[in-house]
Amino acid sequence: MSRLARSHRHLFVLLTLSCIAAAWSGCATGSDKPTTGTSSTSQSSSSGNGGSGGTGGQYASDGGGGGGGGETGACTSTSAEAHRIALDIVFLIDQSGSMTGAKWTGTTTALRTFFEDPASGGIGAGMVYFPTQEPSDCDVTHYMALDVPIDSLPGHGFALTNSMPADATGVGTPTYGALKGALMAATAYQDAHPTHKVILVLATDGDPNGCEGQSIDEIANLARDALNYNGVLTYVIGVSGSTIATLDKIAAAGGTTAAYDITRDISEFSAKMAEIRTAELGCDFEIPPPPNGQELDPSIVNFTYTPNGMGTPKLLPRADDLADCNDQPGWYYDSNIAPRKIIICPASCATVQVDSNAKVAALFGCQSVVN
């Protein structure tokens, strides 16, 4: 495993010991907004008044972790380590007879490459194939139990690879029954592992009409229901023979905008899996347990990014949700009512993901700087 891959995958949240009013814009506990005219998205420090803090925030350590900022006082914070959110993938793979030959070889080769890639280390992966050996099997229960249960790569790669049939010999494309069963398995796993991120990847070459009476809109609604229920995303990879416009509806309903089109070249499968891995790793972080055994106060958490791990950290403002990011740097909670995750806004995520030496930090004890 290269040092670059290891540092990128194990990018962790470094938590600082103090937040001094003179150094961090908006550090005073009396306001939700920065108190100076300096933009908090470009600099982690600014001049100006820090408010009237001085007795320390809720998470002030007994020994005192902060310092005075002249006459402005300081808010004091303690630290706790946090890590990236664990990623789990349920693969739903079409093994109908039309996938035989080069398409099946290309699919299994791409999956094997993904399982063996050092960049996939630590990802949980499970597998279910459709249809079963029964022609056009639309029985949902046959797909609720994964053919290979979820476990961590790279160690689990052998079981996943060993489960792959030598060739695709199934009959029909019962997408409705298979997708419903696989999504039920994925959402159940997400319920059982609330601090993980669970996604489903569907790869198919056929139109999803193997189950009678189910329209494409009804199939897409399965993906929408899973997304709305507990956030499980549905990715779709369209192999040669599929109608991409149809698969786009499933992907869009599942929160991933559009299907990946590899209808012209099955060898693109590996690249698309790498894109999915990049998109889903690196921008969600666990909220560490608050210090001193206290309950989390979401209003006194801040987040910073240090380019290349050196120099002055940049303070990222907090947004209400993804829409509130508004294509600007920042972060938000997965839930403002009962937060469990810190999610970096897309504009900041894109920057952090390409910076293998980046350091991000959660600062506890100072009023959140909001956008």
Image (tube, rainbow, N blue to C red):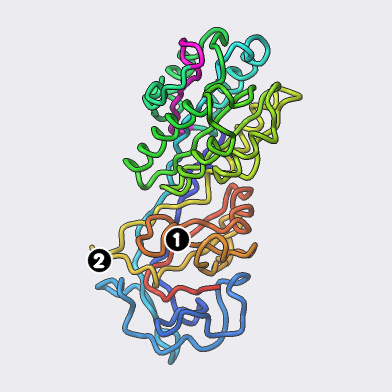
Name the kind of residue labelled 1 in the image. Answer: Tyr
User: Measuring 55% from the left and 60% from the top, which residue is drawn there?
Assistant: 322
Label 2 element class: loop
Name the kind of residue labelled 2 in the image. Answer: Gln
Residue at label 2? 294
Q: Is 18 positioned to the left or the right of 310 in the image?
A: left
Q: Quadrant of residue 325?
A: bottom right
Where residue 196 appears, x then y in whole percent?
Answer: 40, 44
Q: Is 48 positioned to the left or the right of 55 in the image?
A: right
Asked if disc 2 and disc 1 are in contact, CB closer than 8 Å, the reply is no
- Extent of the magenta region: 121-136
First in sequence, mark 2 or 1: give its number.
2
In the image, residue 353 sits, relative to residue 171, either above or below, namely below
Where residue 47 appears, x then y in whole percent?
Answer: 57, 84
In the image, residue 256 sits, relative to residue 91, either above or below, namely below
Residue nearest the observer in this picture, 193 or 174: 174
Q: How many neighbours does mark 1 have within 10 angstroms: few (below 14), some (14-19), or many (20 or more)? A: many
**Comparing labels 2 and 1, the label whose residue is closer to the camera:** 1
Quadrant containing the C terminus is: bottom right
Where residue 117 appears, x then y in whole percent?
Answer: 55, 28
User: Measuring 29% from the left and 64% from the top, which residue is drawn there?
Assistant: 291
Residue nearest the observer in this picture, 260 or 311: 260
Residue 122 seen in this snapshot: no
Where residue 148 appears, x then y in whole percent?
Answer: 40, 21
Residue at label 1? 333
